Structures are given as structure tokens and as C-alpha cells.
């Protein structure tokens, strides 16, 4: 029975989907898409659909801790205030810092920014959004005079050409991807995908440009020159609404000696016909949207990539109109809210500039603060370097896990370990970052906290509380306000609720504005508590679905600026041992370092362990076999990953996701490999082109296990490589080791946690180096272990599904030892559709029985009928199966 339904907003990507969360009498929470929310109209991706499965209190931080021991809030807050006050008094305000996150709400961001910049007197507050969208911020400000996203999601539905650059939209923003896929099906929208990898998104493309990593500027400089050559530029728009065109064109044509197709193709690694087709489509299509994401931003030339894209839209006047414009898609649920409220080290609240004395005056006067930061603070990479070298002596980290997510992650961990005072506010008790904290402060999680977020199309939505705070957890803004009060600023931080903070923030956006700044929420100021509670999703500024439709920008002269963008190829490594280029990113069903998504078993079913995509050509050259373990190394670190040999990866490049942490894998913290080299304008690090070496890991044995209990540390320690993930009833474990295990009869109990009364079935092949164990408690399967000299070939999905189930007949128990179901119990195979738990074997059976389209498969199996993230996988399976049948005939 349901108790209440709450309209709220998803806490994952920047799409900002509306969610209806229904509290049930049994303590569970039902999740459905909000059909009235303009971002998703009822659609949810696999992660959003599984939100109800992530709301347990397992692994939660519920009480403050000091030095690992439970403490009262008073003691913890007193200590934080005392140490920050003493550090500032002795070493000055530049000796302290906050590092926050796109996971916190706008009200939290505003409170933190006010404390640091207006009361500490330093701008040493930065956010993990620095790692995902800082180059977009910088590019927008250079071109438009403000960090303004011109377009909206509807543009993807009314455009005739959509160009996706550095964006695996199908996996990272699935709901928006489905809107584009529907437009393509109904309107015939052309889609160009520009990405070194052939991702799931590329399956939708009419043209996939698998360019050399880092060569985007060359491609778009060539496009700008081509638009001029073919007469496709809008000279009147350029003259009336822009400056700097000639300088940008000079640099664009200087990209090569003549900007010829041959030279552009050579620099980008593309074929001349493909480049020509892209340029022709862009020139001949008025309604063009260019969607870009992390493949553009996360680069040492990220800001130039952004401006090279914007230049092409300014040159054609295709901006601010339906179906036209550059469109930055953000990675985090409130990356935009952080940008708006001043979460970045080089910005003030309400889109005001630290470098502008008048803006500093407006903010300080409004806050009534004793001081205001006068220079930009340390951006993320430099901030943690300052922690490491002792310049930062007290740091407060909120809602993020930099020990895993920052470049040079091992150095970040070492720096935090040596820092005199580290505070971490989080919802999770054990992360690789909380292990470094002197003080832990328990925060509220999604479903417990209250506030606003802004999505990629400037739409502000409410996240609403639907559950009571667990334990002693408190909102992030409350923690900030309490510390501020203890430092002597109680009156300025006397908010009673998130509604109070939103009201103050809205008033600041309107202060001395008079339409001089893009961000103005003045019409939302003065809301009552009920008005705030009932606030419906809205775009800012009022009445503006799209920005710049009038040709007026937020520069001093009101004109947009072309920005010259010289092409700088990715630097080649001086060390010949690093011959491959590592690209990092996300997988479909996981989020960041899995502290939330890792709690939902079905989100681990599609991809259950850390991996490295590598092209067959590179695999053969390095002696790497499919499904083997590989060692990936750089100057900064080392990782052990499962090899996935695939032609979808570009030769010379490899790909690894960054989600796995020290909590769920032995050596898969991929950002330990990444250098701290940053874009000189945005400060955003290069996460897409790291020189690495890849070599086989000399494993003596491989193993796969399932267990009702989480595997014991003593069992995992025997493996050099291990990765754990949840199943419906317990855990699945992948292992490999380079040291021979002399007696698996002694090793198995350490891993599986055998207890008195357990029955163990055993199979051994001593000469072949194989061993298998099935463990039962009465009739119930409580664990199984499969050891082999090579990658273990068993039905992982079937074993994971049967964990905790009864096995009465002896023959059924023997099937567990075989690792496969019998003929009377079909094996669904590896999971393709996480929403409905549909495996590849089930889809293949549907195809063999006559399904010829993705819709047919959906009707037969339900796969692909919810979020649609797996539709490209299904289409590929149909193509492969059809090809196999044709060859057989």
C-alpha cells in the first residue's frame, strides 16, 4: 500500500529528469518518471528507474565521527570551526579550502560559496564539476560574455541535423538520446557522431567520424574555413552581432597551409569523403544543433574546442533559434546550479565575476560580509597540489570522492593523508576519501534532502524530501551555517530552511541587474514556504526558452566574440614505452564511484567489473588475449583491468571507465593513471588522451565466485586482481592471481566464509589446474567458487540469480558445480537490458524466432522498452544474427 507520492528530480546526470517517488507502507519507495516534467515526460534511464533500490541505510554514515570514533554534532562542529579559525588566524585565508560537488543542491552551493568568498575571504572553493564542464563555462564566457547555455532539449527534436561531439549520449544521457532517436525516426533527422570510439550512440549515426583523439579543433577550424569557401556564412549576422571573425578565420585557415580536405583528413585521421560529407551537411542544413560533452571539455584544449564549435554557429547565425545552436550537456545533476551560485573558484554567486570590481561590490554589499575574495582561488588540480605541498592546511570536502576521481589520484590521497586537518561531509561511511578524514559529518542523501537543481537547459527543478533524516544526518547547508555561526557569523547564516536560502539567492541574482546579467531569478524571490514547496520546474530567465535569439549578448558591446582557436595536437609521449592513448569515461548503468548505483544489483548486471577496451590489432601486438587481465600503467600509476578486445575501439587508443574504487576492486582506480595537465584557460584536466603502456598480467589462475556474504578481506588478499559487485541476494566476485595457490580447499573458505554445518560439493582437476566448490546451507546455495588456469567460462548470470535459492535434488546441485543450467532451465545470458533484466540469450532467441526489429524484440521480451539505453545493443545483435543466417544460407 502506498503512503504518499512526491514529485522530485533524479540525482544523476544533467538531463534533470522528473521523478515521482512513492513511499510504501513496507518501507520501500516506488519510482516512476514524471509525465509532466519537461525534461523527460515520464521517461527514466536504468539508473533513475533503480533509485528505489539504492535507498537502504546500508553503508550509510549516520553519526558524526572524530578520528574514527562517534562524536556529537556539537563536538564535531566546534572542532571544525576551531581548526578553520585557528588556521586562518595563523596562516591566512589562503591556507583553507572547500572542495564541493555537483551532487549537492544549489542552496548548499550558495551557502558554501558565501562562507568561503565572503567570510573566509578566499576563493579557494572549487567543485568536481571542474572536471566535467569548466571548459564549457570558459568557452561560453569568451564567446557570449556570460556562462549561458543558448538552447534547450526541444532543439534536438526540431533540428534537421544533430552533431554529437565527444558525447556518448545513449549511455550518459539516455533520456535525451531517446528524444533524439524518436526525432530521427519521425522526422528523418540526420545525426553525425564525432568520437574516436564507436559507442552505442554511434549506432544511431548517419555518419560516424572516428577522429584522432584531441583533433576536434582541426575539424571545426576546417569547417569554419569550408563554410566561408562555400558561401554558407551569414555576413549580415556577423557584421551586426559579432566581432573577431577575421582573426578567427585567419587562424582557422592556418590550421593547415590551405585548410584543404586532404590536410584536415590527415590531421584528424578521417577520410576525405567523410570530412566532405560532414562539411556539406552542416553548410546546407539551416537547423543544426551541435551537442557536446566530456569528450570536448575534458582536454588541455577543451576551451578552444568549445569556441571552435561556437565559431561555426556564430558564422552561420545559427544560434538562439529553434533547432539551432551549440549545446553543452552537463554530466552531473547540479553542475549548472554550481555554476550559477558561484561554486567555481573563479566565479562569484549569481553568475558574477570575481575579476569585476563592480560585481564584487554588489555581492559584498548584498551579503554585508566583512570581506570579499579579490582574486580567483585554486582550481581543483592546483587545490589538491596545494594540499599536498602544505599550502592548504585545512580542507573540507563535500559529497565527492577525489581520492578516486581526481587526476594523479594517488598523489591526492597522499596529500590528504599528510594534511593537518581534513573534513568530509558524505552519506557513505566508507569511501577512499572518508578514510582520509579527521572529521566525518553525515549528510542527507537523495530522498532525504530538500532544495533545487538546474539541468543542462537552464531548467530549475525541486528535489523534495520524501523520507525522514536517518540517524543524525543533516543537510549540507545546515552544516555550513552551523560552522559559520561558531566562527562568529551567525546572523549572516541564520537560515531556517532551504527555502530561506533560495529566497536570498534569488534576490542576489536580481541585485543591480537591470538585464545586464543573464541569470535573474528575481521573479522567484519572496516565495512563501508553501510557494517554494510547490515550485514547478522553470527555465531562467523568465520567458526565455532560448537565449540570444535577438542577437544581443552579455559582452560590453553586446556582440558575440569569435575566438581564434589554433590547433594544438595532443603531445606525443617522450617515453617510447607509452604507446597507447587512454580515454576514460562512464558506463551505462553506473554513476561516479558507485556509492549509490553500486547498491542496486541490477545495475551491476550489465557490466560487472572494470575493463579496458582495446582494438584487436593492438591486442595482438601486445600479446593480450580476450578476457585476460591487463596491466595499464603511466608515469603516475597502475591499474589491473579485464581486457575487452573489440574493433569498436580505435587502433592506438584504449578506453577504461573510472567508476571502480578501492572499495570494489583491487587496482582499478583509473584516475591514478591520469596526469594533472590542464587546459590553460579553464583549468579542466585532460581525461581523454593519456599516454599509457598496456601489457598482459601474468596470471597463474582465474576465478569467479558468488556468495551470500560479502567476500572477506582475507579471501580477497590472495588475489592480485579482484572486483566485487552485488547480486539480487549477495555478491559476485571476479579474481585472478600471479601467485600459485597451493591448496584451494584452504583458500575457498577464506573467500566464501564457510561455517559449521555448511555442505561443500567439490570438483578438482589437479592436472588441469581447475577446482570448483558449491556451498549449501541446508538446501540453500550460499556460495560457489570456480577456479581455472584461464578466464573462467561459466554462466555468471544464472549463478548470480540462483544464489540464495533452494536446491533439493542432487542433480540440481551438480549443475551448480558445472556452472551452467540444464536444458530444462534456459540461461538468460549476460544482461543487456538492466531495466527488465533481459539477457543476450533471451534476445537472441527472440531474433531466431522471427523478431526483425528492435520493436519486435521489445514486444517479445520487453528489452529496450523503458529507457532505451540498450536499443543500440539490440540492433547490433539483430544485425549480427541476420548476417549469420545469411551466411548459413
Image: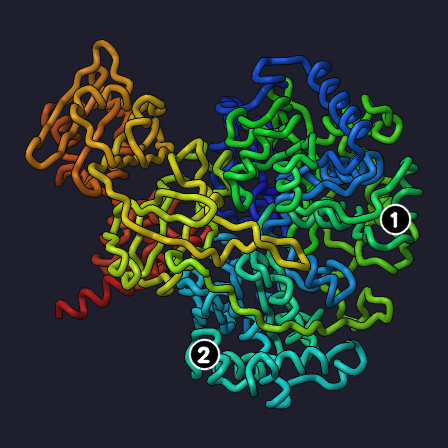
Residue 343, image x, y percentages:
72, 44
User: Relative to the observer, which residue lies in front, 353 or 855?
Assistant: 353
Local crowd at mark 1 within 10 Å, few (<14), some, or many (≥20)?
many
Q: Is residue 596 above or below residue 581?
A: above
Q: Quadrant of residue 242?
A: bottom right
At x 80% / y 27%, what residue is drawn?
Answer: 90
Question: Looking at the image, can residue 725 be seen?
Answer: yes
At x 14% / y 26%, what residue is drawn?
Answer: 813
Image quadrant in which the C terminus is located: bottom left
- Residue matched to label 1: 360
User: Relative to the observer, which residue lies in front, 217 or 774?
Assistant: 217
Q: Secondary structure at mark 2?
A: helix
Q: Is residue 225 above or below residue 729?
A: below
- Residue matched to label 2: 266
Residue 168, image x, y percentages:
48, 58
Q: Quadrant of residue 9?
A: top right
Question: Looking at the image, can residue 334 be seen?
Answer: no
Q: Nearer the viewer, mark 2 or mark 1?
A: 2
Question: What mark, if any, has residue 794 been given in the picture?
Answer: none
Q: Is residue 513 left or right of residue 775?
A: right
Amino acid at each position: 500500500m502506498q503512503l504518499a507520492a512526491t514529485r522530485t528530480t533524479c540525482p544523476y546526470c544533467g538531463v534533470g529528469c522528473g521523478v515521482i517517488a512513492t513511499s510504501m507502507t513496507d518501507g520501500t519507495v516506488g519510482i516512476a518518471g514524471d509525465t509532466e516534467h519537461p525534461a523527460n515526460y515520464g521517461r527514466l534511464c536504468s539508473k533513475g528507474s533503480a533509485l528505489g533500490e539504492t535507498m537502504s541505510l546500508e553503508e550509510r554514515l549516520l553519526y558524526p565521527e572524530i578520528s574514527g570514533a562517534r562524536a556529537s554534532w556539537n563536538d564535531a562542529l566546534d572542532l571544525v570551526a576551531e581548526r578553520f579559525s585557528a588556521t586562518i588566524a595563523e596562516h591566512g585565508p589562503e591556507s583553507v579550502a572547500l572542495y564541493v560537488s555537483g551532487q549537492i543542491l544549489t542552496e548548499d552551493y550558495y551557502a558554501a560559496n558565501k562562507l568561503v568568498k565572503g567570510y573566509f575571504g578566499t576563493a579557494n572553493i572549487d567543485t568536481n564539476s571542474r572536471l566535467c564542464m569548466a571548459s564549457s563555462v570558459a568557452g561560453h564566457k569568451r564567446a557570449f560574455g556570460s556562462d549561458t547555455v543558448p538552447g534547450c532539449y526541444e532543439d534536438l527534436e526540431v533540428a534537421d541535423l544533430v552533431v554529437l561531439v565527444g558525447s556518448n549520449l545513449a549511455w550518459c544521457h539516455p533520456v535525451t538520446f531517446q528524444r533524439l532517436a524518436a526525432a530521427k525516426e519521425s522526422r528523418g533527422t540526420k545525426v553525425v557522431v564525432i568520437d574516436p570510439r564507436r559507442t552505442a550512440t554511434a549506432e544511431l549515426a548517419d555518419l560516424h567520424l572516428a577522429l584522432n583523439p584531441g583533433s576536434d579543433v582541426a575539424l571545426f577550424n576546417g569547417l569554419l574555413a569550408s563554410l566561408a569557401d562555400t558561401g554558407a556564412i551569414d555576413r549580415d549576422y556577423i557584421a551586426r552581432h559579432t566581432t573577431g571573425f577575421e582573426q578567427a578565420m585567419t587562424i582557422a585557415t592556418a590550421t593547415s597551409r590551405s585548410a584543404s580536405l586532404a590536410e584536415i583528413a590527415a590531421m584528424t585521421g578521417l577520410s576525405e569523403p567523410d570530412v566532405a560529407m560532414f562539411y556539406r551537411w552542416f553548410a546546407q542544413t539551416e537547423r543544426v544543433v551541435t551537442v557536446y560533452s566530456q569528450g570536448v571539455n575534458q582536454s588541455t584544449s577543451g576551451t578552444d574546442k568549445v569556441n571552435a564549435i561556437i565559431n561555426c554557429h556564430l558564422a552561420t547565425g545559427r544560434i538562439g533559434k529553434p533547432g539551432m545552436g551549440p549545446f553543452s550537456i552537463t554530466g552531473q545533476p547540479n553542475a549548472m546550479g554550481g555554476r550559477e551560485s558561484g561554486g567555481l573558484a573563479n566565479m562569484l554567486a549569481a553568475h558574477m565575476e570575481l575579476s569585476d570590481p563592480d560585481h564584487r561590490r554588489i555581492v559584498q554589499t548584498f551579503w554585508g560580509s566583512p570581506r570579499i575574495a579579490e582574486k580567483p582561488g585554486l582550481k581543483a588540480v592546483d587545490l589538491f597540489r596545494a594540499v599536498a605541498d602544505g599550502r592548504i592546511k585545512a580542507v573540507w570536502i563535500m559529497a565527492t570522492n577525489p581520492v578516486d576521481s581526481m587526476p594523479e589520484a594517488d598523489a591526492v590521497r597522499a596529500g590528504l593523508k599528510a594534511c593537518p586537518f581534513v573534513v568530509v561531509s558524505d552519506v557513505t561511511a566508507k569511501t577512499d576519501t572518508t578514510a582520509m578524514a579527521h572529521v566525518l559529518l553525515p549528510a542527507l542523501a537523495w530522498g532525504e534532502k530538500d532544495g533545487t537543481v538546474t539541468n543542462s537547459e537552464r531548467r530549475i527543478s525541486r528535489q523534495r524530501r520524501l523520507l525522514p533524516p536517518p540517524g543524525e544526518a543533516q543537510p549540507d547547508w545546515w552544516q555550513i551555517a552551523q560552522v559559520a555561526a561558531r566562527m562568529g557569523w551567525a546572523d549572516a547564516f541564520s537560515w531556517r530552511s532551504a527555502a530561506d536560502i533560495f529566497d536570498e539567492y534569488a534576490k542576489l541574482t536580481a541585485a543591480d541587474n537591470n538585464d545586464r546579467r543573464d541569470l535573474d531569478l528575481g521573479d522567484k524571490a519572496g516565495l512563501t514556504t508553501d510557494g517554494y514547496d510547490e515550485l514547478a520546474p522553470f527555465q531562467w530567465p523568465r520567458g526565455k526558452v532560448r537565449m540570444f535569439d535577438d542577437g544581443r549578448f552579455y559582452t560590453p558591446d553586446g556582440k558575440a566574440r569569435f575566438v581564434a582557436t589554433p590547433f594544438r595536437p595532443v603531445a606525443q609521449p617522450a617515453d617510447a614505452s607509452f604507446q597507447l592513448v587512454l580515454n576514460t569515461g562512464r558506463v551505462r548503468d553506473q554513476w561516479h564511484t558507485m556509492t549509490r548505483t553500486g547498491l542496486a544489483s541490477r545495475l551491476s548486471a550489465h557490466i560487472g567489473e572494470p575493463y579496458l577496451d582495446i582494438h584487436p590489432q593492438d591486442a595482438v601486438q601486445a600479446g593480450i588475449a580476450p578476457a585476460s587481465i591487463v596491466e595499464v600503467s603511466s608515469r603516475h600509476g597502475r591499474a589491473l583491468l579485464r581486457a575487452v578486445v573489440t574493433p569498436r575501439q580505435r587502433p592506438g587508443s584504449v578506453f577504461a571507465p573510472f567508476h571502480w574504487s578501492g572499495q570494489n576492486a583491487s587496482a582499478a582506480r583509473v584516475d591514478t593513471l591520469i596526469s594533472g595537465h590542464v587546459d590553460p584557460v579553464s583549468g579542466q584536466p585532460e581525461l581523454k588522451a593519456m599516454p599509457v603502456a598496456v601489457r598482459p598480467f601474468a596470471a597463474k589462475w582465474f576465478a569467479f565466485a558468488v556468495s551470500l556474504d560479502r567476500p572477506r578481506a582475507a579471501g580477497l588478499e590472495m588475489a592480485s586482481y579482484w572486483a566485487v559487485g552485488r547480486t539480487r541476494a549477495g555478491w559476485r566476485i571476479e579474481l585472478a592471481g600471479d601467485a600459485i595457490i597451493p591448496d584451494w580447499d584452504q583458500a575457498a573458505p577464506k573467500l566464501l566464509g564457510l561455517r559449521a554445518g555448511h555442505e561443500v560439493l567439490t570438483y578438482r582437476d589437479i592436472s588441469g589446474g581447475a577446482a570448483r566448490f558449491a556451498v549449501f546451507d541446508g538446501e540453500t546455495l550460499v556460495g560457489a567458487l570456480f577456479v581455472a588456469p584461464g578466464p573462467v567460462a561459466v554462466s555468471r548470470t544464472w549463478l548470480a540469480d540462483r544464489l540464495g535459492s533452494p536446491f533439493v535434488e542432487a542433480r540440481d546441485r551438480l549443475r551448480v558445480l558445472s556452472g551452467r543450467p540444464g536444458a530444462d532451465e534456459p540461461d538468460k545470458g549476460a544482461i543487456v537490458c538492466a531495466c527488465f533484466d533481459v539477457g543476450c540469450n533471451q534476445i537472441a532467441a527472440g531474433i531466431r524466432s522471427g523478431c526483425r526489429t528492435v520493436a519486435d524484440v521489445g514486444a517479445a521480451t520487453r528489452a529496450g522498452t523503458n529507457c532505451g539505453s540498450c536499443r543500440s545493443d539490440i540492433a547490433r545483435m539483430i544485425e549480427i544474427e541476420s548476417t549469420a543466417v545469411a551466411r548459413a544460407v
